[in-house]
Amino acid sequence: MKSNLLMNFTVDKENNTVNVKREFNASLPQVWSAWTEAQILDQWWAPAPWKSRTKSMEFKEGGRRLYAMVGPEGEEHWALADYTSIDPKTNVKWLDAFCDSEGNLNTEFPRSDWDVTFSEKDGSTFVNVVIKHEKLSDLEMIIQMGFKEGFTIAMEGLDTIFAGEKK
């Protein structure tokens, strides 16, 4: 089992994007399921000690996932993903946003456009995430909020899930 899994996190300020390339020690179907099924997403999407809790999810083009990031004190931060394109086991795209518990957008925070591509090579699955923001200030806000640290911790949580499946 590989312990030095690839994790590249780059910020491209010229194009207002975050690029994350991440390797997982799991099959493509396992990784795809982890990114597209609410019961698995809720196990890793939030950075520990936070938890993710899906209120509703319809994984299809035009569908959406409405979920809360729940803190250790019970505080909730709501978000949604509006799915814009799905190519099974290859690519999924969505518009991400902060919102309230009913899915009404919080316009104080920017929306981001996620493009997530999956590929398999030599027994590992690679996930390439491109997150595009409308303006540089939107990108900088998300980075200042700790996105890199939080997303890195969430990815490690997903590693733990896959390690448990291999036992």
Image (cartoon, grey):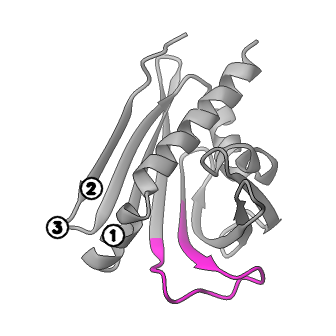
Q: Amino acid at mark 1?
A: Leu
Nearer-the-camera pick, 79 or 71:
71
Residue 15 falls inside the magenta stretch? no
Q: Amino acid at mark 3?
A: Glu
Q: Are marks 3 and 1 in contact (CB under 8 Å)?
A: no
* Marker disc for residue 14: 3
Q: Are marks 3 and 2 in contact (CB under 8 Å)?
A: no
* Marker disc for residue 11: 2
State which region is magenta: 93-112
Nearer-the-camera pick, 71 or 160:
71
Instruction: State the predominant SS element of the stretch in magenta.
Output: loop
Residue 94 falls inside the magenta stretch? yes
Q: Earlier in the sequence, mark 2 or mark 1?
A: 2
Q: Are marks 2 and 1 in contact (CB under 8 Å)?
A: yes
Q: Is residue 132 visible?
A: yes
Nearer-the-camera pick, 46 or 103:
46
Q: Which residue is mark 1?
A: 139
Structural distance between the alpha carbons of marks 3 and 1: 11 Å
Q: Quadrant of residue 167?
A: top right
What's the residue at 68%, 88% (across, down)?
A: 104
